[in-house]
Amino acid sequence: MKAEPGTDATTESELLHGEPVAVYEEREGWAWVQSGIDDYVGYVEAKSLGAAEAPATHRVSALSTFLYPEPDLRRPPRGALSLGCRLALGDTVEVRDTAYRLVVGGGAVIEGHVAPLDAAPENDHVAVAERFLNVPYLWGGRTSHGVDCSSLVQLALMAVGVPCPRDTDLQEAVLGSAVEGATEAPRQPGDFVFWPGHVAIMLDNEYMIHASGHHMMVVIEPLAEAVERIAGKVGRPTSLRRL
C-alpha cells in the first residue's frame, strides 16, 4: 500500500493474499483502497486486485509457504504466501507421501502449512513473534519477507485472534492496559513497550523482541540496552502495556 500512486512512492503497509479490501477509486492503473482487516488506506496497483474465486476457508499457519501450480513440490512455485494469507481450499491430494490442499481457481499448497479459518487460534503471541526472528526489517512490510516494528506486533496478535491496529500510535492507544510505572515496573512475557514510533514485545523481565531499524532485522536484545540506544533518537519509552 503506497502513500501516493506510483511504484517509487513510499510503501506504508502491505495487504496479504486473500485479505478483503474496499476499492474507492481507480485511475491510471492504481486503486485507492481500504483494508478490511485494519482499515488502513493507501494506493495499490489495480492489477493486484481481483474478485475472490470463492470465500476463504483457510489461512496460512506456517511462517511462509509456496503456492504450487499443481500438487507437486518439484514444480516451480507460482509464488510465496506468508503467515495469515487467506485461501479458498478444496480437496486433499497426496503425492509421493506429501499431502496438499487444492486451491479453488488453481494451484496447491502444503496441507500442513494451512489451518481452517474457524480453527482455534494460537495461544502465545510471543511464540509467534519469535518465529520471525532474523526476518529482515522492511518499512511498511507485513510478511515473512520483511516486517516493521508495528506489523510484527499486529501479525503476532492476529495469529492469536486479537485484533490489532497497524501503526504504533493506535496500538499504544488500544492494546491492553497501561502498567503503572511503565518500564520501571516488573515486565512480563508478552508486554508491549512503546516509544514514539516504535514498539517491542517483552520475552521476560529483561529481554525483548522487535523489528529493529538499527539492526535491520527482527532481533532479541536486552530492554535496557535498547532503551539507552533509542533514547538518543526518539526518547525513552512512553508506556508499557499488558493484555
Image: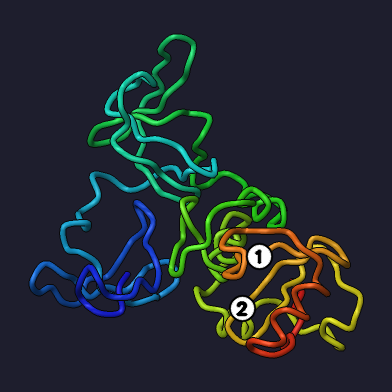
User: In the depicted view, which residue is nearer to us: 39 or 204?
Assistant: 204
Q: Is residue 156 above or below residue 175?
A: above
Instruction: Find numbered disc 1 in the image and state the secondary structure of the residue it sits on.
Output: strand
Q: Residue at x 22, y 68 (%)?
A: 7
Res. 22 image quadrant: bottom left
Residue located farthest toward the top when viewing the structure as drawn? 96
Residue assigned mark 1: 210
- What amino acid type is highlighted by mark number 2? His
To which residue does mark 2 refer? 198
Q: Residue at x 32, y 34 (%)?
A: 103
* Residue 145 position within the rendered picture, expressed as x and y whole percent measured from the top left: 46, 51
Amino acid type, label 1: His
Q: Is residue 115 above or below residue 170?
A: above
Please tell me which residue lies in front, 36 or 29: 29
The crowd level at tag 1 (other Cα within 10 Å; few <14, some 14-19, many 20+) is many
Q: Residue at x 49, y 11 (%)?
A: 97
What residue occupies the far left of the structure in this picture? 28
Instruction: Name the outermost residue toward the right.
Output: 186
**163 over 112 or under it: above or below:** below
The answer to whether 59 appears left or right of 227 in the picture is left
Q: Which corner quadrant holds the C terminus?
A: bottom right
Mark 1 and mark 2: span between their CA atoms? 9 Å
